[in-house]
Image: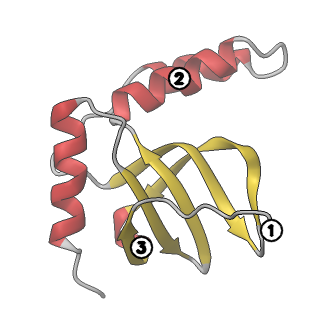
Amino acid sequence: MSKTDELLVEVARLIESGQSNQMSLTVVTGGAVITGRLAPEAVWRQRVSEVLADSERLAEFSAAFAAGGGHEPPTHLHFHMARILQGMVGIPETGGMYRVSIADISAWTMGDVTYFDH
């Protein structure tokens, strides 16, 4: 069993305490590269809840995301405006909402990765 990255946990704590969504991070988890901005769990849950509530087929799941959160210490990072990098593209292009277990992150760096078309 690997040891939890305490520096990454501290970054997550700062995001949770400051209610900030300006920290960009890129992580490697399960072979996937995810890049985007972090959000406090409560903000992330609220936004997912709103998206689900607006869906005719998925509205019943909205309440599950509206409640909860606030683990101490944080166990997950909550990305918004994030992309899974695949070759020269980010999926989805407009950014998505991802929840990633800190314990499953094998590498990370500050900032998000952006591709430029030449």
Q: Position of residue 48 (x, y in %)?
A: 57, 27
Q: Which mark is residue 118?
A: 1
Which callout, 3 or 1, points at the residue further toward the start of the chain? 3
Circle number at residue 47:
2
The quadrant in which the C terminus is found is bottom right
Q: Quadrant of the N terminus?
A: bottom left
Residue at 59 percent of width and 15 percent of height: 50
The extreme bottom residue here reads 1
Q: Which residue is at a point 45% across and 31% down the rendered structure image?
A: 44
Residue 78 position within the rendered picture, expressed as x and y whole percent measured from the top left: 43, 45
Quadrant in the picture for residue 106: bottom left
> Relative to 57, does residue 7 appear above or below in the rendering?
below
Secondary structure found at label 2: helix
Tell me the kind of residue under disc 3.
Answer: Ile
Q: Is residue 4 left or right of residue 45?
A: left
Q: Is residue 30 visible?
A: yes
Q: Nearer the viewer, residue 116 or 37?
A: 116
Say which mark, if any, is on residue 105.
Answer: 3
Mark 2 Cα-neighbour bin, 10 Å: few <14, some 14–19, many ≥20: some
Report the Cα–Cα distance between label 1 and label 2: 34 Å
Does residue 77 appear to the left or right of 79 in the view shown? left
Three-letter amino acid code at the position of disc 2: Arg
Query: Which mark is nearer the camera, 1 or 2?
Result: 1
Say which quarter of the image contains residue 102: bottom left
Q: Residues within 10 Å of mark 1 (few under 14, many from 20)?
A: few
